[in-house]
Each structure stands twice: as structure tokens, then as C-alpha cells.
């Protein structure tokens, strides 16, 4: 039976560990369906509305500046067991805030051309740069979690680690 809610796109299709050269445990290549546009939209939408991108059921927001430590529904940790996971959320926060600044400046410039109110633009820009990062912060974290799951789908093995280690222990990821 196919699980309709959890994001296990690759489950059952090349996810089984195989023994590679020298007896080292390796994984078979994943199915490229994992990178489909519909899956990306589904994950991003869940992340932006602060639902767990993996299962779509658990609410992720604890307070405005903080996500819950793990999804109350599937147990996925919102830091994916990595100490510096929030850095990706901060990166998207800068992108969204700067994007809003650029968009509003261009829009005001076009709408008021040739008499562009430069002083007003300067103050609006400054106010936006103070307010926008706070407004976008939780959504940036949710969006980043969705992006990360799109690139590195959650495996059953990882999920069981998250359920067994719900607090401040971290995985040590080794690049292969
Ligand atoms: Zn979940």
C-alpha cells in the first residue's frame, strides 16, 4: 500500500541498500522522479504555510522566531539533526527580504516615473529592511526545510534516528 501523505517518493524504487565495491554499504541511484516540479511545489507549499514538508500534517511553528523541535505528527526534526541547519533558513530570509526591497523599489520607480520620490524610497527601503526579515523568518525556515527535503529526501533510516533522538543530539554527516 502506498503512503499518500509522507514524502517517500523513492521508497521501494532503488532505496534498498546495496553492497558496493569492497563490501561498502552504498545506496542505489535515486529515481529522478524525486526532482519533479509537482513534488517541489507540494514540499514548498507545505514549508511556507509552516506544515511539515515531509508528512504535511504537523504544524511547525512554536513561536514567531522558533520552530517546534520536531514534527508532532511524523517526528522529523526541524533541524534534521544538524547544528547549523538554520543557516539555510537565514539565507532564504535574506533572499526574500532583499527581493521585496528590489521589487518595491522597481514598482515605485515605474509607477512614479519621472518624478520618483527618492527620499520616500530611501525611508521605505530602510523600514522594509528592519521589518521584512522578522516577518519572513519563520516562513524562510519552513521553506528551507522543504528545499532540503527536495534535494535530500527523508529516508526511513533517518526518520527513525529523529524519533530516537528528539532533542539536542546531532548527526555527523560525512560527505561522500
Ligand atoms: Zn511531519
Image (spheres, grey):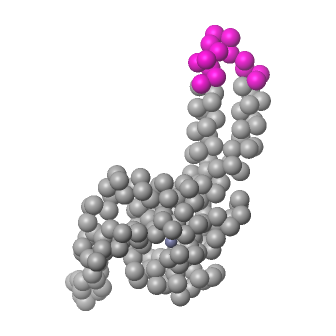
Location of the N terminus (image quadrant): bottom left
Looking at the image, the residue that sits furthest to the left is: 21
Instruction: Examine the rendered structure and indicate whether residue 89 appears above or below residue 152.
Output: above
Residue 131 sits inside the magenta stretch:
no
Q: Residue shown at 44%/65% (left/top)?
A: 149
Residue toward you, 173 or 103: 103
Residue 110 sits inside the magenta stretch:
yes
Quarter holding residue 142: bottom right
| Left or right side of 144 for 13 | left
The mark tally for this picture is: 0
Q: How would you classify the magenta stretch by its main secondary structure?
A: helix
Quarter holding residue 83: bottom right
Q: Residue shown at 32%/62% (left/top)?
A: 34
Instruction: Examine the rendered structure and indicate whether residue 159 appears above or below residue 91.
Output: below
Q: Residue shown at 44%/76% (left/top)?
A: 174
| Left or right side of 110 for 129 | right
Task: Give percent across and percent down for residue 16.
Answer: 27, 81
Task: Give percent across and percent down for residue 67.
Answer: 64, 66
Q: Is residue 37 visible?
A: yes
| Left or right side of 130 for 18 | left
Magenta range = 107-120
Residue toward you, 139 or 84: 139
Q: Is residue 175 visible?
A: no
Task: Give percent across and percent down for residue 146.
Answer: 48, 60
Looking at the image, the residue that sits furthest to the top is: 114
Location of the C terminus (image quadrant): bottom left
Instruction: Examine the rendered structure and indicate whether residue 102 appears above or below residue 87.
Output: above
Task: Give percent across and percent down for residue 131.
Answer: 74, 44
Amino acid at each position: 500500500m502506498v503512503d499518500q501523505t509522507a514524502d517517500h517518493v523513492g521508497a521501494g524504487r532503488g532505496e534498498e541498500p546495496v553492497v558496493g565495491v569492497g563490501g561498502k554499504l552504498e545506496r542505489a541511484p535515486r529515481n529522478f522522479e524525486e526532482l519533479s516540479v509537482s513534488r517541489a511545489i507540494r514540499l514548498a507549499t507545505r514549508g511556507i504555510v509552516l506544515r511539515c514538508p515531509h508528512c504535511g500534517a504537523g504544524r511547525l511553528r512554536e513561536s514567531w522566531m522558533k520552530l517546534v523541535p520536531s514534527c508532532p505528527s511524523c517526528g522529523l526534526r526541524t533541524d534534521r539533526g544538524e547544528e547549523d541547519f538554520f543557516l539555510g533558513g537565514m539565507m532564504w530570509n535574506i533572499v526574500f527580504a532583499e527581493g521585496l526591497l528590489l521589487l518595491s523599489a522597481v514598482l515605485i520607480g515605474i509607477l512614479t516615473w519621472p518624478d520618483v520620490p527618492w527620499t520616500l524610497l530611501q525611508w521605505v527601503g530602510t523600514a522594509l529592511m528592519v521589518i521584512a526579515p522578522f516577518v519572513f523568518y519563520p516562513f524562510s525556515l519552513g521553506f528551507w526545510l522543504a528545499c532540503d527535503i527536495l534535494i535530500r529526501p527523508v529516508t526511513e533510516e533517518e526518520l527513525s534516528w529523529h524519533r530516537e533522538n528528539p532533542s539536542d543530539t546531532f548527526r555527523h554527516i560525512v560527505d561522500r
